Image (cartoon, rainbow, N blue to C red):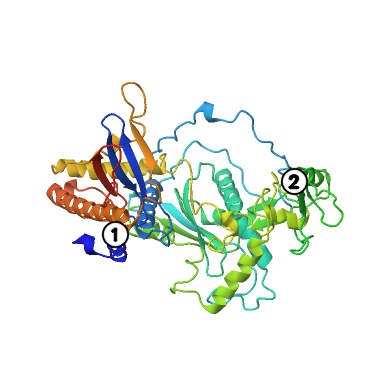
Amino acid sequence: MWNRLPTTAIRELAEANGVCIRPVVHEVTDTDTGHVRVVATPCGATLASKCPPCAQKRRVLRMQQCREGWHLEEEPPGPEPKDPEEKPDRKPTRRVRSTRRRQDAPDLPHLPIEKRTVGSTFISRTGKTYRPSMFVTFTLPSYGAVREDGTPRNPKTYNYRRAALDAMHFPKLIDRVWQNLRRSTGYQVQYFATVEAQRRGAPHLHAAIRGAIPRELLRAVSRATYHQVWWPDHSTPRYLDDELPVWTDEHGYVDPATGVPLPTWDEAMDELDADPEARPAHTLRLGSQVDMQGIIASEGDADRRVAYLTKYLAKSFTDSLNAAPELTRRQRAHVRRLHEEIRHLPCSPRCSNWLRFGIQPSEAAEGMAPGACGSKAHAEHTLGCGGRRVLVSRKWTGKTLKIHQADRAEVVRQTLLAAGVEVPELERIDASVVREDGQQRFQWRVWDPLEARAPVYRQVMTRAIAQRIQWRTDYEAAKARAGPTNAPPRPPDNQRPLLGVASVKGERSELT
């Protein structure tokens, strides 16, 4: 029956059943038996615009990670130590600057940091013990008056340049927040945070913080936190699009009119270090609005906040600007203007936009052009925030995301085994499996795109959908047999087997 369905219908059916719609097809050869399997693995996309099922499963996994570490009462296991052999032979050179605080920034208390991550307990008048945590939102300052839809009332006076620079360096400012919080509270504050876009396009941070911190102290940290960008001055462009620096094999980029080599990045930074009156190229600060809420694990608001924290993880930055399906004409104009500013500002020492300001980027190479930097920070769908959308402290749960995924898979596995359902061992074709002679047993090869015609995609997808439906039926039946007391703690929304496996004999096989 499914063989008669068009490809679009199969795609819609896959989305409805939580199956990856753009799987990566592999050919796995068992060197012991000669069997060849065609295996399709999920693409693992994090944005719904690319693959809604994979993005939703990733979001649910993040929800599990956030929920598990928020209200711990005991110290989590420490992160696995790094292999000393993985450390680089030489440490990258770091320019040391004075750590003296700015005179216009208020001082903060500096307490010895205890070796604990869990919050303190409080006893109510009734004698009940509570261990509250917090949900905090940090925002950036104003760049000009805006309307309810986030667009500026006067685009001519709106400070687009500062908004762009703040967005591009926002993660560094948030790092300072956690440093100041730990020094001011005296314990190792742990957090699970997500970076989202406000309607005006500026990033803001929602953070689940383990333990309770006095609200006045949080406000003081917000007021006193800043980050200085010590880069060469890039306030005024030196070169325009019609006369850009020219590449030469001998000196790198040179002035198009005089042929004089442009200063390299290291030379420009040396000049900045030698200037006693030098000032930072940009200084970031947080806005005055700080939303703080106390959260208790036993109350229902905790789960609602976890869902709110991860609400927009499957959407791009621009998708989350407005609750409506599409941006209005005024909002699109605002996004284009902000993106135009971001596109021509440098995002890192290696950014090609430094050529516009008369400086050779670090690791300069032929073919660089201002406005063509490949960093995600310059993309319109990120609006300057090209880094991670989820920020998790190392001791939040003491586990990596892969371990969390394995834990959820184990819950499913044990539930199915308890109900007498056979669980496929996916590790049996893992690339790490070796033969008796120590050689790799299973050889994985990405299917040649020229071979992945529509019949192959159709066969892989129909197998995956059938497998998913059967798996869900077995799991629901297993939960019903286990009863409410032995049911798994959370529904396994993000678990799925391999999308489709076809086992054949011989040197070559095709799904038809």
Quick check: 473 above or below 189?
below
Instruction: Give how far across and how far down residue 464 sits, in percent.
Output: 26, 52
Q: Is residue 485 shown to the viewer in this render? A: yes
Q: Secondary structure at mark 1?
A: helix
Residue named by callout 1: 14
Q: Nearer the viewer, residue 202 or 464?
A: 464
Q: What label sits on residue 246 in the rendered view?
A: none
- Figure disc tally: 2
Q: Nearer the viewer, residue 89 or 260?
A: 260
Residue 39 is left or right of residue 253, and the answer is: left
Q: Secondary structure at mark 2?
A: helix
Residue 360 is left or right of residue 380, and the answer is: right
Tell me which corner region of the image, top left, top right, bottom left or bottom right, holds residue 98.
top right
Look at label 1 and name its amino acid: Ala
Quick check: 482 above or below 30?
below
Residue named by callout 2: 265
Q: Residue at x 47, y 38 (%)?
A: 116
Instruction: Give how far across and how far down residue 56 sits, in percent.
Output: 36, 57
Q: Nearer the viewer, residue 364 or 56?
A: 364
The crowding category of the residue bearing disc 1, from other C-alpha atoms within 10 Å (few below 14, some 14 to 19, many at least 20), is many
Instruction: Give how far across and how far down residue 119 sits, in percent.
Output: 44, 45
The crowding category of the residue bearing disc 2, from other C-alpha atoms within 10 Å (few below 14, some 14 to 19, many at least 20), is many
Look at label 2 and name its amino acid: Trp
